[in-house]
Amino acid sequence: MAFKINDTVSWIGKIDWELRKFHGQQLSTYRGSSYNAYLIKDEKNVIIDSVWRPFAEEFIANLKKEIDFASIDYVVVNHAEPDHSGALPFIMDLVAPDTPIICTANGAKSIKGYYHKDWNFKIVKNGEKLSIGSRDLIFIEAPMLHWPDTMMTYLSGDNILFSNDVFGQHFACEGMYDDLVDNSELMYESIKYFANIVSPFNKKVLKKMQEFKEMNLPINLVCPAHGVIWRKNIETIINKYEVWASSYSENQVTLIYDTMYDSTRKMAEAIASGILIEKPDLNVKLFNSSKSDNSDIITEVFRSKAFLIGSPTYNNGILNSTAAILEEIKGIAPENKKAAVFGSYGWSPANIKIISEFLKEASIEVILDGAKSQWNPDTNALDKCVEFGKEFARQI
Ligand code: FEO
């Protein structure tokens, strides 16, 4: 059902309470999500974005109750990823045949790549304005936040920023506004979203936030394409994006390990105790990567000033879950974080070398020689892990 933001602007998206995985099976979304699309009525009527394909028919049926499709003048595609463009072919079947799709040059390429249609693309550039009657739309290109095609659209008069993925969260809520939801849940989902989706492009984020501030546009509402509409904490989320994009860390250390017969787990716990002996104020968290969600671990790595990764040697390599989380860490390319490696082994400490080299190739600073322990660590071996933890804490 549509939701009126004001007399002429409506939310026309879909709240997806059931979503638990996104980007295929890659990203966890424990609190569901929403695909936020918007309708603006003026002398020219505008749709901004749509919904994921599974909800296209529902989207169209609901939108028919709000507007005659023949009276839609522009379809703005801020971002072509299918969670926002899935219903586009359905819209284009119902609007006048030459209705312009407003998007960036990269947007047109992506839309053509997905839907193989030569619709009437109207390419816009950064800062371009379009009058829709009593108000203007201003298009703000935001390349790599988080795709090359991404842009945001600003509505003058009402001072609404339709920011697409930027400032979004995978967070289903019926209340729609940021001040109507649990703030700690909202901010956790915001940082999780940033860490997993946006942080690989931190430099672009910083540049865009700076440019955006210099545009000096008054903003009454930020309407992203996922999650809540920001009306109370607009400055907070914009400032958070600047802070998160600036080599962010909290006073936290995260240990990630997998284990076969508890040897590497015991090492992790001994190292953690050493860290805390040296720096009792640190927030130290441990995750068994085979039992924990990778998107959550990535969020915790993003929040940490340093992290440690452990796996036993397995068939002259490392365990699956360690390889998987290493790949994800490389993907977000965390800046300014120190790391160290640990793990048990039977006859070959290949684990230490493999993990250390992977981290170094991912441009992560590995401090200390990895802590290794043969077979089941005894008291002496665990004492060495405690000392390793103390030294790690001293060096971060
Ligand atoms: Fe929510 Fe990049 O799509």
Image (cartoon, rainbow, N blue to C red):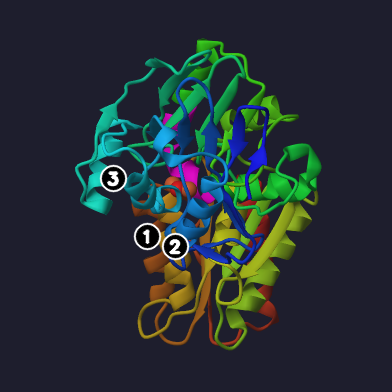
Q: Are marks 1 and 3 in contact (CB under 8 Å)?
A: no
Against 19, residue 193 (above or below) is above
Q: Which of marks 2 and 3 is nearer the N terminus?
A: 3
Q: Residue 358 carries which label?
A: 1
Q: Which amino acid does label 1 sit on?
A: Phe
Label 1 and label 3: CA atoms lie apart by 36 Å
Q: Residue at x 42, y 59 (%)?
A: 53
Secondary structure beneath label 2: helix
Relative to 81, is 111 on the left or the right?
left
Q: Which residue is drawn at 60% across and 30% down?
A: 9
Q: Mark 3 points at which residue?
A: 111
Q: Residue at x 34, y 53 (%)?
A: 361
> For this rendering, which residue is in front, 22 or 294?
22
> For this rendering, which residue is in front, 115 or 232?
115
Note whether residue 290 is visible: yes
At which x and y percent is residue 369? Answer: 48, 60
What segment is highlighted magenta in the picture?
A: 195-206
